[in-house]
Image (cartoon, grey):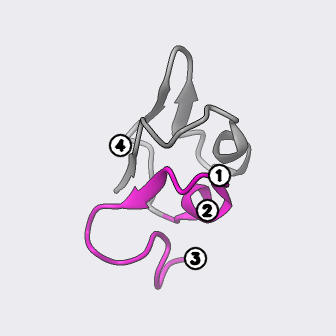
Amino acid sequence: MIVVDKQSCDQCATCVAVCPVDAILLDERLTIDSGKCIGCGRCARVCPFGALSEVCGQPAGAGKE
């Protein structure tokens, strides 16, 4: 599962554009829909601020895709 560091997030929406399942929502703040997120890690890899990470201890997207 991907989590957002809200203090690091600049709301640039780079991650929104690369999510293959539209699991990232940007309204007043960035949120991840855990029901849709497949944990591919694309969002974390493109985030220029390092605001997204996977919670299970591995780098986001490790061993997936």
Instruction: State the CA–CA distance, disc 3 to disc 4.
Output: 18 Å
Number of the front mark, 4 or 2? 2
The residue sitting at 68% across, 59% down in the picture is: 46
Q: Residue at x 26, y 69 (%)?
A: 56
What number of labels is visible? 4
Residue type at mark 2 is: Arg
Give the amino acid type for the residue marked by disc 4 in the picture: Ser
Instruction: Assess whether mark 1 and mark 2 are in contact (beta carbons under 8 angstroms).
Output: yes
**Alpha-carbon span between mark 1 and mark 4:** 14 Å
Picture quarter with the C terminus: bottom right
Q: Image check: 5 left or right of 13? A: left
C-alpha separation, residue under disc 2 versus residue under disc 1? 9 Å
* Disc 2 packing (10 Å; few <14; some 14–19; many ≥20): some
Closer to the camera, 16 or 6? 6
Q: Position of residue 24 (x, y in %)?
A: 54, 37
Tell me the kind of residue under disc 3.
Glu
Inter-mark Cα distance, 3 to 2? 9 Å
Q: Is residue 7 above or below residue 45?
A: above
